[in-house]
Amino acid sequence: MSEASAVDERVGPVARMIIIVTAIVALLLLSAVISEAVRMLEGRPLSGLHEQLHLNRIAVTEEPCVRQAPAGTNPFFQPLGNCEFLLPEYAEADAYSIFTRHSIVGPRSSWRVLVDALHLFGALSIALFLTVLGVTNGMRGRSRINGWARKLWLGTTYTMWLTGFAMYRLQEDADTAFFPRITPEDMPWLRHALFAAFSISFLNVVCHANLFRPAKLKPLLVQHAISVVAWVPLLVVLFYRLFTLDTMQFEWMYTVELLALVTLYPVLDIVNGWVLFRTQVQGRPYDWDAHRHDNYVIFVVMVVSSVLFFVAFDRHYFFATQLPPAYRLGLTLAGTVGWVASGALGRWVMRAARA
């Protein structure tokens, strides 16, 4: 379909209802975020409903954390974990929240609560925008609400990158008990590279999903360059560890799981970069509506995979024990497997190859 092709701009009654219901749910959740942030800033105890949720949370078992699989066992089916635990100063603080175990201690806690609330505000907003786009013909849509959703999605993603960067830079020492990591010596340079490569990949995809409508080409090229600079040393280190670390240790298993999550992202940069080279340098024609819609789907897959990656490591809210790596990998790759099985990946790659 060409850029000038006409698309029905009417929004049907079912789509309208889905948008309205999603907007109401998003507003309710956003009001809860604001209320929770204010409570944490003021240091007030949990509300009655919140306290009930806290009391009914999944209890962590007394089983010790395992960082090395027993000899003769399959490490993929052992409860290897990063030994995450809840620090007393978090659990005993008046501002403690079941929705976040960080941002409530340390000298910069007020700023961190504010940044976290803004980041979550952006995440819920993006969920609404993606829903609007999904029921209004995706990135091929030409309705007015579709146009507003794509612009707000693009702007909010950049805002979330800024708040995510602030969250990353404002971490306290106690946060190392919350954020999954491989080893302490990874910090700072490897975590900096991981943050830059991981986060900018989201910006690249959302820009391709909105390329020329309204995203600009030059900022996207700069983002691609930064992404490549960050990915190269990061992948070198990760693959080096994959072939040198003890396969019975958590450090090796976490490397496998991290590669399962992030190896796709450089592929996205390569394929999307190839499309830009063929069209902008060699002047080849291209179906930009299809390209935008492909990247809209990719963005959804990235969000689902990232959320499930962190959920899989939880042993406090969703799971009472540490999930074995095989189950964690299944959760992490669920979105990607669905994307591949639907044929969307093949169509995207073949379209780019024919550019």
Image (cartoon, rainbow, N blue to C red):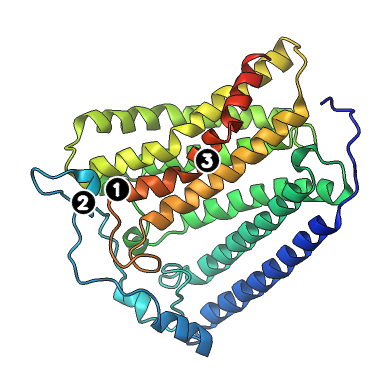
Residues tagged 1 and 2 counted as in contact (Cβ below 8 A): yes
Secondary element at image label 2? loop
x 63%, y 74%: residue: 34
Dot 3 or dot 1: first in sequence order is: 1
Task: Classify residue 141 by image quadrant.
Answer: top right
> How many angstroms separate mark 1 from mark 2 (CA)?
7 Å
> How many angstroms separate mark 3 from mark 1 (CA)?
20 Å
Dot 3 or dot 2: first in sequence order is: 2
- Farthest residue to the left: give it: 71
Instruction: Find residue 78 and name its label.
Output: 2
- Percent across and percent down for residue 223 are 60, 32
- Percent across and percent down for residue 316 are 35, 68
Query: Along the horizontal axis of the image, is 149 left or right of 347?
Result: right
Residues tagged 3 and 1 counted as in contact (Cβ below 8 A): no
> Which numbered mark, 3 or 1, is in the foreground of this view?
3
In the foreground, 13 or 270: 13
In the foreground, 13 or 306: 13
Whether residue 348 is situated above or below residue 70 in the rendered picture: above
x 78%, y 43%: residue: 137
